[in-house]
Image: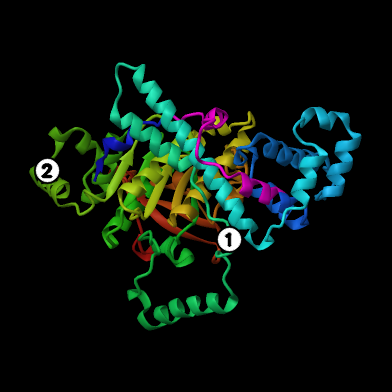
């Protein structure tokens, strides 16, 4: 377990939109005939026009007259806000003949060009292949400009660091990934059923010994409802300040690392790595956190136990912390993807602490609720992309403390936006004020504190409530039999 300095640098994102305006005139990455074939099909077949508008933008066309035809079609479709309409060759010809504004906006588009496009002999079955080729050529042009800009900047800078250049290039690749356009993501019910039955029978046969990709928290109070966190899930762990969100998240990570040889990442926007390490070892060695902070107070036995934990922890090379100050969601996504790549796709579980400290960066719109919606959507998309569960910690709004019933509800998620919509599982932690008062008056303040764990949303199962107990001095949540407590 360590903080890897390779992930400390915040990438300096380049403005790739500006790069697209610098395409080289003498580039080899273009195909006039494919551009015309795509446009020909778009003005001849209604559904293909919609697909072309969906998948392409003007930068996909290198030749200016072809670019203007595409923009002409898109402009007319954008003008029709009441319905989605496709415009035929005849429609476009009529617009061009009667609308002087259109003629000024797209001066290279004329009747002769439209006639040529409408009479081309093109196999419409190749349309998506042609579209894919145009996307690839446009990305190659962008890469060409990126390379030239980087080379030119290196000529004029006295201090160039290879790592910075590499980071910029990796960022470029991530932001310009090409997704294949086809229908291969669709599978029949028959195939889906066969896949499901294979897993179904293995679980029936092997039971608890079945080795799937589920991430179990090690807390029966949670796992009995969720049956483990699954690939692609976004899990929200929410509570008011001081209840133990970070502690429980660290305990879960520790359990995940112990139960199976997983790789985990913990991204903290609130707490420096040193504090997280203290909490981690306090819980794992059952050594009071205060004594780890001031090791002079340790007994010889405690020092020995702690040393064993330092040297024999099997998670030393499998837990990665990041406490760098950047809070932009684009940076967080980049770092997680970069770590996954470094681990050859073997990153299994990620915790982000916490949601309200993240910013949308360039995605921000001025409306915080919309910004948080974009952030939660980005985390959900990342979980799906990497095929891992991601847990994001979240605060609850103060309104929960102003109600007579203090139990959190989904609408109590602070700056919720679409958090509850994007989340597959929402877990609340809370403590009864009455219970805390009884503890203060009647019992040892150092004894475990009963904490409610509420599964408020469970996309693949039932919601429910259970209890765990928090021992604050060693920052550890535990499950204790009620009749023993």
* In-front residue for pair 431/162: 162
Crowding at mark 1 (Cα within 10 Å: few <14, some 14-19, many 20+): few
Q: Is residue 19 magenta?
A: yes
Q: Is residue 446 visible?
A: yes
Q: Which mark is residue 251?
A: none
The answer to whether residue 31 is above or below residue 64 is below
- Residue 101 location (% of width, % of height): 85, 29
- Residue 444 location (% of width, % of height): 32, 46
Crowding at mark 2 (Cα within 10 Å: few <14, some 14-19, many 20+): some
Q: Locate residue 68: give its quadrant.
A: top right
Q: Which residue is mark 2?
A: 303
Q: Which residue is mark 1?
A: 182
Q: CA distance from mark 1 to mark 2?
A: 60 Å
Residue at the image point whose x is 39% and y is 29% from the top = 325
* In-front residue for pair 9/303: 9
- Residue 150 location (% of width, % of height): 40, 27
Q: Locate residue 416: give its quadrant.
A: top right
Taking the image as shown, residue 243 lies to the left or right of residue 115, namely left
**What's the magenta region?**
13-39
């Amino acid at each position: 377990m360590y903080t890897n300095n390779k992930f400390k640098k915040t990438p300096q994102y380049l403005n790739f939109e500006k790069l697209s305006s610098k395409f080289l005139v003498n580039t080899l990455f273009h195909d006039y005939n494919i551009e015309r074939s795509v446009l020909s099909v778009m003005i001849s077949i209604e559904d293909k026009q919609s697909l072309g508008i969906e998948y392409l933008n003007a930068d996909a066309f290198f030749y200016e007259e072809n670019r203007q035809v595409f923009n002409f079609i898109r402009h007319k479709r954008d003008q029709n806000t009441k319905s989605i309409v496709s415009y035929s060759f005849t429609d476009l010809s009529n617009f061009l003949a009667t609308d002087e504004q259109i003629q000024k906006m797209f001066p290279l588009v004329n009747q002769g060009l439209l006639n040529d496009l409408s009479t081309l002999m093109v196999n419409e079955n190749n349309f998506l292949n042609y579209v894919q080729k145009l996307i690839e050529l446009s990305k190659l042009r962008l890469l060409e400009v990126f390379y030239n800009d980087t080379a030119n900047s290196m000529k004029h800078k006295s201090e160039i660091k290879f790592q910075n250049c590499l980071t910029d290039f990796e960022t470029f690749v991530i932001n310009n990934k090409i997704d294949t356009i086809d229908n291969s993501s669709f599978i029949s019910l028959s195939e889906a059923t066969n896949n499901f039955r294979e897993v179904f029978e293995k679980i029936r046969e092997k039971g608890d010994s079945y080795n799937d990709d589920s991430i179990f928290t090690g807390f029966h109070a949670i796992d009995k409802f969720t049956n483990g966190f699954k690939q692609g899930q976004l899990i929200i762990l929410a509570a008011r300040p001081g209840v133990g969100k970070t502690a429980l998240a660290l305990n879960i990570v520790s359990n995940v690392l112990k139960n199976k040889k997983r790789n985990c990442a913990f991204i903290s926007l609130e707490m420096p790595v040193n504090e997280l390490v203290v909490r981690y070892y306090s819980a794992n060695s059952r050594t009071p956190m205060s004594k780890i902070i001031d090791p002079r107070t340790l007994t010889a036995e405690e020092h020995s136990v702690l040393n064993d934990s330092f040297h024999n922890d099997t998670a030393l090379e499998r837990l990665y912390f990041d406490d760098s100050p950047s809070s932009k969601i684009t940076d967080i996504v980049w770092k997680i993807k970069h770590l996954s790549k470094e681990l050859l796709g073997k990153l299994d579980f990620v915790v982000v602490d916490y949601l309200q400290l993240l910013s949308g960066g360039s995605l921000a719109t001025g409306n915080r609720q919309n910004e948080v919606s974009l952030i939660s959507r980005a985390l959900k998309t990342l979980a799906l992309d990497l095929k891992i569960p991601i847990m994001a910690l979240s605060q609850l709004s103060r309104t929960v403390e102003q109600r007579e019933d203090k139990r959190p509800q989904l609408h109590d998620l602070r700056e919720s936006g679409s958090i509850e919509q994007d989340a597959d599982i929402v877990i609340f932690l809370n403590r009864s004020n009455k219970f805390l008062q009884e503890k203060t008056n009647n019992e040892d303040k150092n004894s475990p504190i009963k904490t409610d764990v509420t599964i408020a949303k469970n996309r693949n199962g039932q919601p429910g409530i259970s209890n765990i107990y928090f021992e604050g001095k060693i920052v550890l949540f535990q499950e204790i039999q009620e009749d023993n407590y």
